[in-house]
Image (spheres, rainbow, N blue to C red):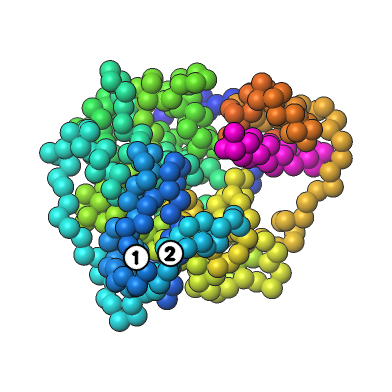
Amino acid sequence: MLALSTLFKRSFSHGIHPDEYKDQTAALPTQRMPFVERYILPLHQHLGAPSKPSVEAGQQVRRGQLIAAPGAFVSTSLHSPVSGRVKAIGQRRFPGGRYEQAIEIEADLYATQRLEVDRRPDWRGLSLDDFVSVMQGTGIVGLGGASLPVHVKYSLREGVKIKHLIANGAECEPYLTNDHRVMVERPEALLRGIEILHTLLGAEESIIGIELNKPDAITSLGEHIPSDRPFRVAPLRVKYPQGDSKMMIKSLLDIEIPKGLHAADLGIIMNNVSTIVAIADYFDTGMPYIDRMVTVSGPGIEYPANLIVPLGTPVREVLRFCGGLKAETKEVLMGGPMMGTPIASLDAPIIKSSSGILAFTAQQTARPKEVPCIRCGRCVEACPYFLNPSKLARLAKARQFDKIKQANVAECVECGSCTYSCPSGIPIVQLIRSAKSEMRGKRGKA
């Protein structure tokens, strides 16, 4: 048992302590969402270039079949979550409100929906380059929120040696519990995935970082770790955003990633625990990434749940399965309350980054009255990246994009700690996010 002094050192500077609100679903076993009639599969569910359709309207497809190929190296594949017929390919509503090119599939109501896959490779016979190529074809992306196609992370520069493989099980966002349930219910699959990555990357050690509010996951994984492997579970202090990659690396290894460098440059690879399980599932069963684990929770939902949901399932159908929304519900978010986004239409689909669907009433969504900044410094004390959020917000409001760039706005990960901490009710992270979006738009038009 680790000494308490060691546990309390495992953290990072700054950050916040929001209420967790995980009790609704933390102990609920994962259920599988039934198949529905219609699925919407956007082609751009990941960082990088969108996927390119490899099917046509009217074509019959089977569950697990490739329906869109990678559009570039930083891109990934897309597979059908059901057996059925391609109804159309065209613009469909994305969860955030914009319209994106998507493949619409009408499920075959008489199909067994049994997964039929081609022969899967044996990972033990793969080189790292081969592994990268295989992973691009699986459709797996980082499931901690960034949605970077997973193969990109393993495409290492020549000479890079990986010392530490980190499995990120922090799940520090309030309400969300799907990673927690993965660790409790599927410890063997997680450790198989770690074994695959550890071996192919040639890592010296593998660490599973878990916040202390998940004692059952810590215990379960600790009991399953092989005694002859350099794997260990590292309990972490409960603090937001502990799950941010740089914060977790600081907490676990006391290493700070310098500006302009990636973790791999310092011999570190990190993946979310659900991502690692998805890799294990592919090599165990040949299943590409077609299902997403989702936490459905919040005071506005009738029956909270942890669900396995086929990609492309309309949010409306997921809510219906959970008993629907309560009459007093005012807003539905996709993701967690700190970094998630309001859903513009309940007909929008579950996508690869959909970690949660949260329903809130007027009590939670009421916006505090905004008053002038009092220069209290609380946002500075909260920011884990040591930025000056109030300054960034003022520059964003004034649309002084050159100055906001000089103030290192690119370092902001939009965790929301600043807005949470602001006593003046200023929507700091929303202002910063809007400015960054406009700056990207200007670069795109240049």
- In the rendered image, which residue does mark 1 sit on? 56
Q: Secondary structure at mark 1?
A: loop
Q: Quadrant of the C terminus?
A: top right
Query: Left or right: 144 with respect to 369?
Result: left
- Residue name at image x 27 percent, y 24 percent: 204
Quarter of the rendering containing residue 119: bottom left
- Is residue 423 on the magenta stretch? yes
Amino acid type at circle 2 is Ile
Q: Secondary structure at mark 2?
A: strand
Pointer 1 or 2: first along the chain: 1
On the image, the x and y values in percent for residue 250 come to: 48, 24
Q: Is residue 393 visible?
A: no
- In the rendered image, which residue does mark 2 sit on? 89
- Residue name at image x 23 percent, y 27 percent: 202
Tell me whether the residue at label 1 lies in contact with that at label 2, contact meaning CB atoms closer than 8 angstroms: yes
Quarter of the rendering containing residue 185: bottom left
Amino acid type at circle 1 is Glu
Quarter of the rendering containing residue 310: bottom left
On the image, the x and y values in percent for residue 10 come to: 49, 27
Residue extent of the magenta highlight: 420-446
Principal secondary structure, stretch drawn in magenta:
helix
